[in-house]
Image (tube, coloured by chain):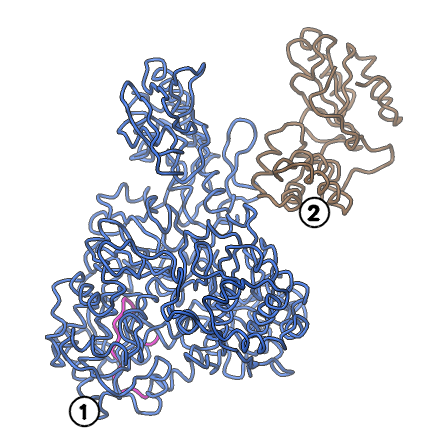
Amino acid sequence: MTDSLIRLRVNGRDVASPEGTMLLEACRQNGIEIPTLCSDPRLKPASNCRLCEVEVEGRERPACACATPVEEGLVVETHTPALEDFRRAMLERLAGRIPAEDPARLAGKPFRKLLDAYGVTPSGVRRPEAKHPEHPYLDVDLSWCVACGRCVRICDEVQGQNIWTFTGRAGDLALAPELSPGLRESACVSCGACADTCPTGAIEDVTRLAEGLPERWVRTTCPYCGTGCELDMGVKGGRLTEARPVVASAVSRGHLCVKGRYGWGFNDAPDRITKPMIRRNGLWEAASWEEALEAAARAFRGALDAGGPGAVGVLASSRSTNEENYLTQKFARLALGTHNVDCCARVCHAPSAAGLGQAFGTGAATNSYADIERAGLLLVVGANPTENHPIVGARIRQRARAGVPLIVIDPRRTELAALATVHLAPRPGTNLPLLQAMANLILGEGLADTAFLATRTLNLETYAASLREWTPERAGALCGVEPEAIRRAARLYATTGPAMIFHGLGVTEHRQGTDGVAALAHLALLTGNVGLAGGGVNPLRGQNNVQGSAQMGCEPSRLTGYQKLAQSRETHAQVWGADLPEAPGLNALEMIDAAGEGRLKALLVIGYDPLLSHPGARETAENLNGLDALVVVDLFLTETAKAFGTVFLPAASPFEKEGTFMNGERRVQRVRRVVAPKGGSRTDSEILAGLAERLGAGQHFRHRDAAAVWDEARQVWPAIAGISHARLDREGGLQWPCPAEDHPGTPVLHVGTFPGGRVAFRPLAWEPSPEASDAEFPFLLNTGRSLFHFNAATMTGRTRNRDLRADDELEIHPEDAAELGLAAGDPVRVQSRHGSFTLRARPTDRVRRGEPFATFHAVAAYVNLATGRGRDRVTGTPEYKVTAVSLHAVTKRKA
Amino acid sequence: MNHPLPPDTANEPLAPGQRLPDSERKEFSPEALVEIQAIMAKFPDKLAATLPALHIAQREFGFVSLAAMKAVAQAIGIPEGHVFGVATFYTMYQKAPVGRFHLQVCTNISCALRGAAQLLEKVCEKTGVKPGQGPSADGLWSVEEVECLAGCGSGPCVQVNHDVYDEFVDEKKLLEVMEACKRGDYRPWAK
């Protein structure tokens, strides 16, 4: 599509529209609404309903406006009496299929509006057999279906699941294949796209039918993963009643997954805590905000008096806004006087920030999601985006289906791996040899981009020499991968440009996580795939604002902007009007360790559950037990709070506050207050200000609102200076670096040059993980997430996602299962050198022999009882992905 | 007179004594997969291989079972839902088990004027099965009432599997055809 305007004449009026626009859209842009039932901006034109037929001068028959591109000089009539009669007749025919009863189902739907406009009333009857079995989120009654095909197309063209199809000759809608008795038994991922596009309510949200149309809509950003989809939240009676995708969103383009679309029920969960509490004599007692804040402040004062600033620490929340994270690190540094502040990036993508920072000079994704459609090849490493970043995953799948080569490196045969051109399945813990061998091949076979290497990199010779030992044969033997497959992957990646890399925790959560990320960065450098659209290295960030949390300075050695302490100390001190502490800080894991050693006395934990999510849960518990005070700011009584909390301060949810999130492609997007904070809960900003006041640092936290906090952050971090709340409200999300108000933001990093000029290759030495399997612990346990739940399931576990996937499961190869005498659903005890947990077995050939995989969501499973002490050598990120274990069938006692 | 389907030697009925393919079958034979690959190579878009692959499925599976549709989707690499939609759109893919000889009687206007209804009744009487009721106990016969078989000038017509008999089929000729079927040389005058 180009910018040139095409001029045409519609209903006697001259109008202009960009080339490539369809008549339907061109007319809409010019204020002429043409009736349509089957078109949706997310879908290719189908011309099913024929309602948009218009008369085009010189054509014998009317043409569908949805599928007719604008042409220079076209003369179009859209509402002649003949067309209008035809439309009424078509609507009457369709209305004959729709039951006259229960008009509520049609309320607010496009079909209702058309019927009203043409004075047509439904006259059909309900067909009992057309009602589908119950589903937690989707109510399907095909009595209302007019066979427009939008659900079939959106399930195909957007989600790529192909659950819906037509059957027979009469345009009857059906589940595909019809052997599925209902949606729940099918491969449906409950993204709700069909219900969102359905113009009649034949497929509708359960909540819409129960609650009716919302009174108002508020646009905000999804609080789940780092993709950063936009949501339109519906509100009725002061409560959330539904979430809908935003078609105009640059990120999600009108699509959502089961978490964003339906996972907002936690906001009103019955066990949400909305009053402050203080633990007295082991029991939680309700308290006033005044009492609770005073108790918390007293605890910190006590710890500071007893042990100095090293005795207190703060765990910030990647679930909170940028503004609150900015305040959190400022609180730690000014109110507590310590650099002991960290966020959960420590347990996920800290190696990405470190590895990409070392390699390129900026520790963030180089490119944008929009580049998925520009890439000539996609390389997905240690990531399972169809489950964990479903909107990104769906788009990668669509590209693979369209024939774009896809390489997947993952020990498991994930959905994307099953679609891949090449799937390399290395043994857990052997990413580095595999990537080194690919790099060696690219250099050895002369496939590297020599011009790029000559002008933009340094230290190639030393690096190349360090690679020579990594032949595909040597790496293949270590990784358990065919050398020929490594060759194929390397050649394909090097010769099909632009090639875009996505990676996930399968790269970072290893002893050599940072090196793994660096190895990926090297591949991109070798092939010149940096600094161009459709290329780069892109970590798929796990939490909505984990990028923002680290970027705002919730890192012991980094300040706002991920700037090194030494580099930005002065700027911060100047803007803050106060000096920053001198002593270096501890990271999240070190803080917990220090608590065990009695060095850390008081800890503030915001929206974080270290007891459940840190590895080696038993040791974490012992360490937390060493604290004198543990102040928890959260929505729910987390495992950490239950066991060790001394003060609980109830926080406002992401739907109850103003601010911004930063997604995995460096895009800052607005978060808006959809509903008022529930009960007595307060925003983190209010809580931090209240604590600071009582710690004698109140003057640093008297911001008018979230925008004022953000404006302060813009002063200390030049890369976001051009992004204001007002601009975000006006233009939508912006990607940093955006140094000035008139700067458009940066979709692709490192075009032409790197922040430090040229970048140097760094030789990487491989060290095998000590978590090796042996006779006693013959299996290597891998861990991860499922589509339906998010991390510790604090949020999704309080929604009906529970009904879609109730329990965590241990995926195990069928032959391993058979040898252990395990059938599907049998309990199996997983024992490691560190501890054990019990899960139900799910035999599947998605995993290889000897490499079981556990999801870690629910408290009941407590997978982290067994995970170990291994940490990334650079960032300290735990090695969640490799634990040697033994498996034991739990024998059922005979009655 | 041309049949709307292309000539399909692959769909020849089984020889007497040969058994119907197992409908419990889940996968294509290796030979069938080779055949499907060859078909796919002819088209720029793999979706185009759906129809011929379904014919192969009907031959191998005995009818287009759900397992057959899944196998087709797998073999071509397209969504199951698409195969299901196509298979159910076309009536000449049998979605339920049929007899070794599937007798189809046209009852459209031209044939009807020359006694198609009576012929259909006769077919049911002689085979002992009713339209859409599945194969007879011996597995030989099934009956279906169909739309125009393109023999309007010489109806009533009967089609056995994919072969049309359109020379004014009456009871005598019907019995001739059925006898020929049982003997194995059922196509003496089929088109």
Numbered disc 1: what chain? A
Q: Which residue is mark 1?
A: A305
Q: What amino acid does circle 1 point to?
A: Asp
Q: Are marks 1 and 2 on the same chain?
A: no
Which colour denotes chain A?
blue
Of A522 and A802, nearer the camera is A522
Mark 1 Cα-neighbour bin, 10 Å: few <14, some 14–19, many ≥20: few
Q: Quadrant of residue A206?
A: top left
> Where, quadrant-wise, is the N terminus of chain A in this rendering?
top left
Foreground disc of the pair 1, 2: 1
Q: Is residue B155 left or right of residue A401?
A: right
> Where, quadrant-wise, is the C terminus of chain A in this rendering?
bottom right
Q: Quadrant of residue A463?
A: bottom right
Numbered disc 2: what chain? B
Q: Which residue is mark 2?
A: B26
Q: Position of residue A888 (x, y in %)?
A: 59, 76
A332 above or below A750? below
For label 2, the SS is loop
A539 above or below B77? below
Of A395 and A161, nearer the camera is A395
> Is residue A629 part of the magenta span, yes or no?
yes
Q: Is residue A516 visible?
A: yes
Q: Position of residue A25 (x, y in %)?
A: 35, 32
Q: Position of residue A865 (x, y in %)?
A: 46, 78
Point out the stretch of residues depicted in magenta: A626-641
> Is residue B62 part of the magenta span, yes or no?
no
Q: Quadrant of residue A362?
A: bottom left
Which colour denotes chain B?
brown
Q: Is residue A534 left or right of residue B152?
A: left
B172 above or below B94? above
